[in-house]
């Protein structure tokens, strides 16, 4: 097949050449982690030893060259581009595509021409399609709009050219994640999604583009997209299209969404529709939203509650309040109270006080920390309750402490703050600064991290009132690295913000070697059973794709670390997250592990990934996805997949627990 790619003349003809004599004995770039030389490469990457990695890039063994590029993809250091460039023309396809992938991971705009020169324009037997696919994706992570224009106008790929089409669609999508779009790109993605001859992998990327691109218009395509959503049989594509229809507000699209809301058996599609309703006229959307407040599926009821918080109005607050029932789950109840408190007009001080007292009573009678935290969050919807954050949260659990500090942030950013306090507004801000300082003195790392976030956030308007960073400097001295690296960097960023200096984050150091001896007691696919308070979840862990992460998970599991840990974060139709020793997302142990970011993708449901606060800051926390999440690709270590028990994953809520994890040898 002759492939024509209408982009600048920088693209060159198929690269050919003789294989050097010393490489003739190698027929593949196969990696075997049982061998010490391959383990050594992972240890080099773990230590971020770029000089040793560079030396490996010219090794006679193509598997080691492949691994040098793989390591560069995880480290993301621009200095590696000089020695990655020759690997783009390596005799082995595996090395070439890994080098292209690494270029995209590093994301340097200056590397686009190098990538284009490596693109093989002529190919009569499709042997280079995988390399070309990764080049297209890498251009999407690095290029400017002119390259996007060319990529979007390619017309020569047939619906059967799956690999190249996937590269094209992923390239356009990666551009969109960086805020770069062109009309031709949107038109191409609409073509992909509305023509079912294209492979589902390509159509999924197109659907996520329409869902996530921040600055596109689909007004000219809304009927085609809406009709495709209705007829679509793939639930992952359908739910993304439902989200994309938030970009329009015509009655026809709304009617189709509401019909799908009634008929769809998949709660995830319904969640996305409820979120999309926020962009349609309130009068047309509110009735179906209210119906879902009492839905037996907690994800749906909670999402309906979020609608009231984000899109409710002052006229109907007492109607919202009537939906609260004693038997209602605390998560939904807290969201309804949040909406009532938020939307009750400022002038109704007595009503707000009454509502706040009701919420405070529910908090005091709550049976678990997450329930208490939910009601404390509800109280933060009225700026007048700023003292309650301290009184009801600072002496509580770690979960409640961090929630209280987050509540102060919410209060400071409330649009009605100045209206509520009038001429006292800055005096109250000063009071809140004093409360924040008290929270910092408690030495709680979650509170300190959130305090840093509050201070450096321009929306809180605290900078003019803080003349001395001494209290933050003192907080830095109480933090240990790398365990508290997230908190440390938040405080450093706050200091830099106040002092008008450039912030350079502290990098996590090498602290936790891979336990190869432990790892090799297990087969290539490590099977795990997780017994939770909601049922059993079974996983396969990808030992050969993320050995350091899997080894760490096994060690923590065998030590009993995960027993009793809570699922502290649940986002409907996104993720469930656990593994925090504090239970609020700010906990860690006294080490970090490296990010492992090979070209594996979050394009299905049930993937297991590591939570992090930046590259190489992972430790104990991990998540499971409810559905495809391609915006996580290349940034969050993917180390496993659910093989059984997705119904349990979908039922998990905040506060559910891990009873036991068993790793099968």
Image: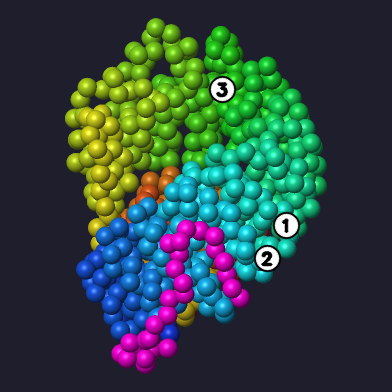
**Tag 1 and tag 3, C-beta contact below 8 Å:** no
In the image, residue 470 sits, relative to residue 384, either above or below, namely below
Disc ID at residue 342:
3
Marked residue nearer the N-terminal end (2 or 1):
2
Q: Is residue 7 left or right of residue 224?
A: left
| SS for callout 2 | loop
Residue 313, position in %: x, y?
64, 21
Residue 552, position in %: x, y?
38, 66
> Of all residues shown, which one is farthest toward the top?
423
Q: Measure the C-alpha gap from mark 2 to mark 1.
A: 9 Å
**Tag 3 and tag 2, C-beta contact below 8 Å:** no
Residue 629, position in %: x, y?
55, 54
Disc ID at residue 195:
1
Find the magenta span and give its range. 1-27
- Mark 2 neighbour density, 10 Å: few (under 14) some (14–19) many (20 or more): some
Please indicate, yes or no, whether residue 391 appears anywhere in the rendered image: no
Circle 2 residue: 159
* Viewer-side residue, 89 vs 616: 89
**Tag 2 and tag 1, C-beta contact below 8 Å:** yes
Marked residue nearer the N-terminal end (3 or 2):
2
* Residue at image location 43% in from the left, 52% down from the top: 143
């Amino acid at each position: 097949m002759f492939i024509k790619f209408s982009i600048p003349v920088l693209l060159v003809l198929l690269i050919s050449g003789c294989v050097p004599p010393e490489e003739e004995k190698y027929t593949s770039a196969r990696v075997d982690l049982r061998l010490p030389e391959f383990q050594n490469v992972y240890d080099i990457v773990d230590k971020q030893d770029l000089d040793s990695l560079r030396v490996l890039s010219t090794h006679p063994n193509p598997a080691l060259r492949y691994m040098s590029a793989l390591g560069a993809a995880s480290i993301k250091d621009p200095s590696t581009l000089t020695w990655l460039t020759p690997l783009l023309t390596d005799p082995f396809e595996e090395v070439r595509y890994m080098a292209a992938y690494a270029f995209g991971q590093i994301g340097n705009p200056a590397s686009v021409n190098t990538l284009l020169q490596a693109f093989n324009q002529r190919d009569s037997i499709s042997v280079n399609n995988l390399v070309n696919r990764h080049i297209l994706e890498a251009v999407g992570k690095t290029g400017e709009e002119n390259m996007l224009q060319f990529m979007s106008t390619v017309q020569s790929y047939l619906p059967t050219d799956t690999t190249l089409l996937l590269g094209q669609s992923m390239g356009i999508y990666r551009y969109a994640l960086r805020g770069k779009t062109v009309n031709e790109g949107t038109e191409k993605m609409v073509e992909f999604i509305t023509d079912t001859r294209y492979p589902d992998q390509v159509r999924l990327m197109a659907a996520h583009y329409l869902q996530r691109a921040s600055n596109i218009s689909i007004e000219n395509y809304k009927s085609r997209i809406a009709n495709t959503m209705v007829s679509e049989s793939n639930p992952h594509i359908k739910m993304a299209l439902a989200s994309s229809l938030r970009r329009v507000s015509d009655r026809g699209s709304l009617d189709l969404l509401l019909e799908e809301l009634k008929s769809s058996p998949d709660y995830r599609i319904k969640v996305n529709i409820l979120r999309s309703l926020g962009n349609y006229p309130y009068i047309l959307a509110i009735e179906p939203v209210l119906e879902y407040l009492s839905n037996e599926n907690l994800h749906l009821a909670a999402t309906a509650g979020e609608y009231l918080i984000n899109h409710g109005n002052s006229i109907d607050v007492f109607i919202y309040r009537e939906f609260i029932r004693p038997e209602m789950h605390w998560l939904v109840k807290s969201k309804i109270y949040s909406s009532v408190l938020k939307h009750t007009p400022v002038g109704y001080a007595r009503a707000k006080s009454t509502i706040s007292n009701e919420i405070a009573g529910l908090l005091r009678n709550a049976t678990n920390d997450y329930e208490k935290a939910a009601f404390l969050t509800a109280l933060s919807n009225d700026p007048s309750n700023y003292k309650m954050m301290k009184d009801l949260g600072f002496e509580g659990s770690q979960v409640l402490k961090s929630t209280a500090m987050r509540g102060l942030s919410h209060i400071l950013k409330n649009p009605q703050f100045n209206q509520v306090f009038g001429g006292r507004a800055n005096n109250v801000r000063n009071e809140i600064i004093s409360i924040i300082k008290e929270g910092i003195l408690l030495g709680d790392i979650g509170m300190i991290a959130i305090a840093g976030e509050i201070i450096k956030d321009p929306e809180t308007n605290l900078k003019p009132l803080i003349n001395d960073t001494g209290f933050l400097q003192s907080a830095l001295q109480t933090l240990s690295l790398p365990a508290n690296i997230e908190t440390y960097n938040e405080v450093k960023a706050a200091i830099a913000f106040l002092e008008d200096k450039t912030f350079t984050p502290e990098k996590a150091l090498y602290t936790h070697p891979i336990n190869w001896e432990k790892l090799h007691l297990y087969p290539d696919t490590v099977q795990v059973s997780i017994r939770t308070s909601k049922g059993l979840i079974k996983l396969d862990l990808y030992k050969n794709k993320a050995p350091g992460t899997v080894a760490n998970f096994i060690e923590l599991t065998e030590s009993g670390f995960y027993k009793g840990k809570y699922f502290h974060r649940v986002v409907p139709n996104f993720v469930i997250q656990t593994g925090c020793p504090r239970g609020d997302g700010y906990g860690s142990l006294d080490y970090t592990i490296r990010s492992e970011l090979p070209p594996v993708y979050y394009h299905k449901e049930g993937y297991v990934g590591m939570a992090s606060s930046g590259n190489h800051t992972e430790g104990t926390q991990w998540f499971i996805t409810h559905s495809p999440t391609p915006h996580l690709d290349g940034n969050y270590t993917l180390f496993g997949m659910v093989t059984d028990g997705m119904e349990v994953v979908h039922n998990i809520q905040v506060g559910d627990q891990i009873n036991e994890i068993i790793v099968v040898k």
